[in-house]
Image: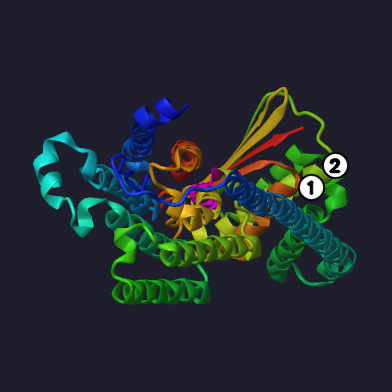
């Protein structure tokens, strides 16, 4: 298991992300008149974030990485803190701001997003070193809160609305359910981050397993949702 | 998302997690997974229930509308019947009396002025016939008695006599028995079309095609009047009545028209 994960962890994560993004591109024409097109852009964005985020392991950048040794950006914690934790939260705030219909809910989401961005900036300014060494508990928790709030508002809005929505044919339902589970499940891991080092292989393997399962679940749900709800969008 | 790159060659020693801590993490994640799954499950169940309720509500509303349409039809029918009785018993009687009196007078007056009297008599006679046939076409009992085809023929004859327009009926297939209530509704739909044609179309010709098939009756009514542009015209009570009546008997109904190309109505009824 350990060998397998060492060898294939990144490649599996990356390929499942690419699968979701490619599915999005294939079905793009069916979604191009809906807010779901932004979600497809986001899936493509994640592929690039993941790709660039792996710079410390790239062989052809070995001289550059040699030079980065000892600097703050020697490791890629900061990259994922900014472009995944903060970036994806901003995206989801933007996305839910588009798909929510109630103007009150929309403004709640908008202000929550603004507060999140401001507080993240303040956090980075006060503890500039934290995001370079992977101590970003605050960012992860606030991001999880904002995203869960978006999802809950979306669910409540659908339940309250008077239209008959076949939710199992709605892409937004799949997105919401999936990110609800992903953020809930992966957030607590951040508190154990101090153990994520080569002296503690048991924990490293555990965390890899958790993230691998969570990611496979998330991106395959996205892929499935994109394919399944494309029929309805076209009607 | 893998957001941490592990530096495998890091030399300094770091804190090590105990087995119980790792178990706590797994436990926490399991609990959160269950909680979020429950939230989603709750949502799905609730949404399904809501959909069902909404559908029920929608169905009830439709049924209610149908009931109203039926009640409206019954009231209308009753009113028409009353008018028909009045025409027949009251106006008809008065005209008969007038006719008789004219007969009496005609014997008393001199020859030279009797020509004018004859004309008056003719007019009175015509009116009497007119009133009787109108009363027949209004009274649904009569329609039931004489049947759909005959009723329509009577109506068309009336138009021909009054010279509203040249009207003709074409019949194919063998007339089948149709439920009496449905028969009246079909007749009323066609009658509504006639009255609209008379009022608005300025048509010269009107034709009715009735095709009896094994399982259905298809009626095609068309005039060659001024017509109207579909969509531009405001839906008056006439058109809505025709539609709701057709729905009552589960018939396919369509009305088609173009400017200056007349209007045509198509009705398909399954017995």
Looking at the rendering, the stretch of residues picked out in magenta corresponds to A169-177
- Residue topped by disc 1: B184
Q: Residue at x 73, y 38 (%)?
A: B149
**Chain of the residue under the numbered disc 1 shown in the image:** B
Residue A54: x %, y % from top left: 25, 43
| Nearer-the-camera pick, A184 or B243 | A184
Where residue B145 sits: x, y (%)?
A: 87, 42
- Dominant SS of magenta comes to helix
Q: Which structural element holds mark 2?
A: helix
Label 1 close to label 2 by CB (< 8 Å): yes
Residue B154 visible to an observer of this rendering: no
x, y percentage for residue A194? 43, 54
Residue B80, given in percent of the width and then of the height, sits at 81, 62
Q: Residue at x 67, y 46 (%)?
A: B157
- The answer to whether residue B211 is left or right of residue A78 is right
Badge 1: residue crowd in 10 Å (few <14, some 14–19, many ≥20): many
Q: How is the structure coloured here?
A: rainbow
Q: Which residue is mark 2?
A: B180
Q: Is residue A230 left or right of residue A118?
A: right
Question: Do circles 1 and 2 both sit on a common chain?
Answer: yes
Tell whether position B190 is magenta: no
Label 2 marks which chain's residue? B
Corner quadrant of residue B75: bottom right
Mark 1 to mark 2: distance in Å? 6 Å
Is residue A27 among the parts visible in the rendering?
A: yes
């Amino acid at each position: 298991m350990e060998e397998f994960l060492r060898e294939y962890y990144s490649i599996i994560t990356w390929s499942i992300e690419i699968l979701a993004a490619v599915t999005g591109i294939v079905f793009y024409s069916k979604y191009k008149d809906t807010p779901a097109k932004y979600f497809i852009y986001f899936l493509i964005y994640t592929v690039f974030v993941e790709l660039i985020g792996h710079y410390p392991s790239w062989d052809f950048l070995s001289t550059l990485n040699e030079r980065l040794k000892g600097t703050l950006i020697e490791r890629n914690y900061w990259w994922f803190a900014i472009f995944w934790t903060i970036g994806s939260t901003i995206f989801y705030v933007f996305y839910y701001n588009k798909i929510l219909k109630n103007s009150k809910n929309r403004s709640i989401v908008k202000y929550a997003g603004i507060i999140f961005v401001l507080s993240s900036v303040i956090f980075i300014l006060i503890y500039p070193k934290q995001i370079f060494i992977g101590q970003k508990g605050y960012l992860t928790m606030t991001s999880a809160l904002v995203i869960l709030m978006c999802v809950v508002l979306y669910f409540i809005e659908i339940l309250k609305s008077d239209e008959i929505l076949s939710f199992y044919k709605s892409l937004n339902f799949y997105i919401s359910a999936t990110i609800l589970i992903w953020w809930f499940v992966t957030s607590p891991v951040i508190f154990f981050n101090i153990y994520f080092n080569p002296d503690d292989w048991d924990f490293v393997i555990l965390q890899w397993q958790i993230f691998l399962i969570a990611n496979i679940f998330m991106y395959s749900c996205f892929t499935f949702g994109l394919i399944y709800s494309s029929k309805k969008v076209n009607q | 998302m893998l957001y941490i790159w592990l530096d495998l060659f890091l030399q300094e020693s770091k804190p090590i997690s105990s087995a119980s801590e790792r178990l706590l993490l797994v436990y926490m994640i399991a609990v959160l997974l269950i909680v979020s799954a429950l939230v989603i499950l709750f949502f799905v169940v609730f949404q399904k229930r809501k959909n069902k309720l909404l559908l029920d509500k929608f169905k009830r509303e439709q049924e209610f509308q149908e009931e109203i349409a039926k009640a409206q039809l019954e009231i209308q029918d009753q009113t028409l019947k009353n008018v028909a009785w009045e025409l027949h018993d009251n106006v008809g009687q008065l005209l008969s009396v007038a006719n008789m009196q004219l007969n009496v007078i005609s014997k008393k007056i001199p020859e030279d002025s009797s020509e004018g009297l004859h004309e008056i008599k003719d007019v009175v006679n015509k009116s009497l016939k007119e009133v009787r046939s109108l009363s027949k076409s209004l009274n649904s009992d009569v329609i039931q008695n004489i049947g759909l085809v005959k009723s329509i023929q009577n109506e068309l004859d009336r138009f021909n006599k009054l010279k509203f327009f040249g009207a003709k009926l074409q019949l194919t297939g063998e007339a089948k028995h149709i439920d009496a209530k449905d028969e009246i509704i079909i007749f009323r739909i066609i009658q509504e079309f006639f009255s609209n044609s008379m009022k608005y179309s300025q048509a010269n010709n009107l034709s009715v095609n009735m095709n009896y098939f094994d399982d259905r009756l298809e009626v095609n009514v068309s005039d060659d009047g001024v017509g109207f542009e579909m969509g531009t015209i405001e839906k008056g009570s006439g058109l809505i009545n025709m539609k709701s009546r057709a729905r009552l008997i589960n018939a396919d109904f369509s009305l088609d028209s173009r400017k200056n190309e007349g209007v045509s109505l198509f009705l398909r009824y399954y017995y």
